[in-house]
Amino acid sequence: MSGRIGRTSAENRKRAEKKRGRVHRKDREKTVETAGKKEVWKPGNLVYPLPAVLVSMATEDGRDNLITVAWTGTVCTNPAMLYISVRPERYSYELLKESKEFVVNLTTEDLAYATDWCGVRSGRDYDKWKETGLTRGRASALAFAPTVKESPVNIECRITQIQELGSHHMFLAEVLAVQADTAYLEENGRFSLNQSGLLAYSHGEYLSLGKSLGKFGWSVKTEKKHAGKKKKFP
């Protein structure tokens, strides 16, 4: 209290602003003067957007669960392999470790609520299948883990390695089978996955995919079509 005596309102305001600035920048190390005035922060993961998937698993004795995972991705094409990263304290961790298998179920806008709910509730306290109304499906290549029938794509995986990295342990897995919803199969056999309303996760928010900007390789095709014209690089 005594420290405030004799200060003007302007001084108090400057002191408050300085204090707020310290709190706001507590995780930032320094400011680098660049053209964009970017700041250098402490190490962290800002690789966004990411898929927000529902991972389903089950054990031989019938314990099963659903967990929402954004730390997931492709690691190899041939053989087809992917990973998920899970904190060891999660209920699903021991189920995964015991069963050595899981299913990655892609999510859509229609599944957004259930996807978020499964990410903030624990399987220790809830039967997530019952609470969300999602339907168990039968995997074609796994012994225990069910699929999510409402998902447009179910990727059946067998765990090959568990790498204890730190806050998360990475489950490296081989893809044994993929189930795809025939509703998105065109007459020519092309699978129109992007028409399913896929869900993405970015910096704490769930997002729908935006409009298409081009197909793989379109920049090269554009160069050939407009030979001699200036490239549209930033």
Image (tube, rainbow, N blue to C red):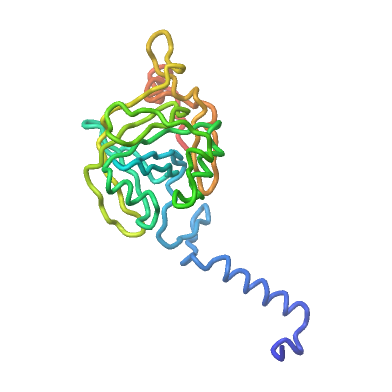
Picture quarter with the N terminus: bottom right
- x and y percentages locating residue 99 in the rendered image: 28, 43
- The image quadrant that residue 50 belongs to is top left
Residue farthest along the front direction in this orientation: 61
Residue farthest along the top direction in this orientation: 187
Q: Residue at x 43, y 39 (%)?
A: 54
User: What is the count of numbered marks?
Assistant: 0
Q: Residue at x 22, y 42 (%)?
A: 160
Q: Is residue 114 above or below residue 1?
A: above
Q: In this rendered view, identify the residue nearer to me: 68 or 19.
A: 68
Q: Is residue 205 left or right of residue 157?
A: right
Q: Residue at x 40, y 60 (%)?
A: 43
Q: Residue at x 39, y 39 (%)?
A: 56
Q: Is residue 232 above or below residue 161?
A: above
Q: Is residue 111 above or below residue 71?
A: above
- x and y percentages locating residue 121 in the rendered image: 50, 50
- x and y percentages locating residue 229 in the rendered image: 44, 23
Q: In this rendered view, identify the residue nearer to me: 31 or 3.
A: 3
